[in-house]
Amino acid sequence: DIQMTQSPSSLSASVGDRVTISCRASQNINTYLNWYQQKPGEAPKLLISAAFSLHSGVPSRFSGSGSGTDFTLTISGLQPEDFATYYCQQSDSTPTFGQGTRLEIK
Amino acid sequence: QVQLVQSGAEVKKPGASVRVSCKASGYTLTNYYMHWLRQAPGQGPEWMGWINPNSGDTNYAQKFQDRVTMTRDTSISTFYMDLSRLTSDDTALYFCARETGHVGYEYWGQGTLVTVSS
């Protein structure tokens, strides 16, 4: 299976900050990379699909980039509701997820 | 609107089996595969497999190949995931989720907590 590695595993930031989360695949996945946000007790919520396509209803402060093995999720202008855990997931082959990045309030 | 509603929490003893159900509504059932995933405490989601609602064909993750069975009853728009020979490592939140092609899991059930404890 393709391994997905996220960094950092946790991150402290303030409202209004710009943050980036990285995700690396163990082999080339083209742009078959999706990003999710998850809050405690809830199912993951799809934010970005195919590396950079914003899912319907997701605020434009979220953006994704990358291809091949290296990908980035950027949140520009953090809002209070953005403090959550973020996961990347590859859909090139048998689906696998990263271990998550917990975004906390500084 | 699309909704996936799962059955309630379960507590099982080691060695037992569990069935989790997922009732789908708001879309044409036969147009989308249904996937099952689980999430252990503090970890990322883990894919378990999918079922084709048309044919009933399944594809399971190798890890669960000999312990999981996914079925569906199209007459009541409900999917089932059976997991046998439970151990404490199977304690997790189990989700059904609908995928659209390669573009990720757009819709998720609310999750079903399965606790395995003696």
Image: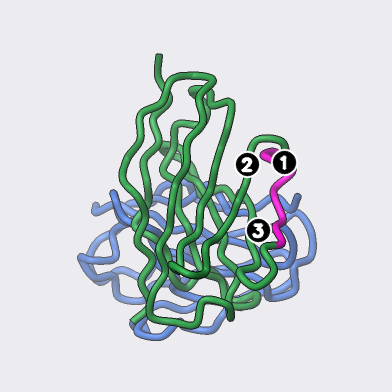
Chain colours: A blue, B green
Amino acid type at circle 1 is Gln
Instruction: Report the chain holding disc 1.
Output: B
Q: Which numbered disc covers residue A95?
A: 3
Separation of marks 3 and 2 at Cα, in angstroms:
17 Å
Q: Tell me if label 1 and label 2 are in contact, CB under 8 Å.
A: yes
Q: Is residue B63 magenta?
A: yes
Residue indicated by mark 2: B68
> Do the residues marked 3 and 2 share a common chain?
no
Disc 1 packing (10 Å; few <14; some 14–19; many ≥20): few
Asked which secondary structure carries label 1, the reply is: loop
Name the residue located 54 percent from the left edge and 42 percent from the top edge: B82
Residue nearest the observer in this picture, B84 or A73: B84
Chain letter for mark 2: B
Quadrant that contains the N terminus of chain B: bottom left
Q: Which residues are magenta?
A: B57-64
**Visible in this render: residue B96?**
yes
Viewer-nearest of discs 3 and 2: 2
Relative placement, left or right, of B28 versus A102 is right
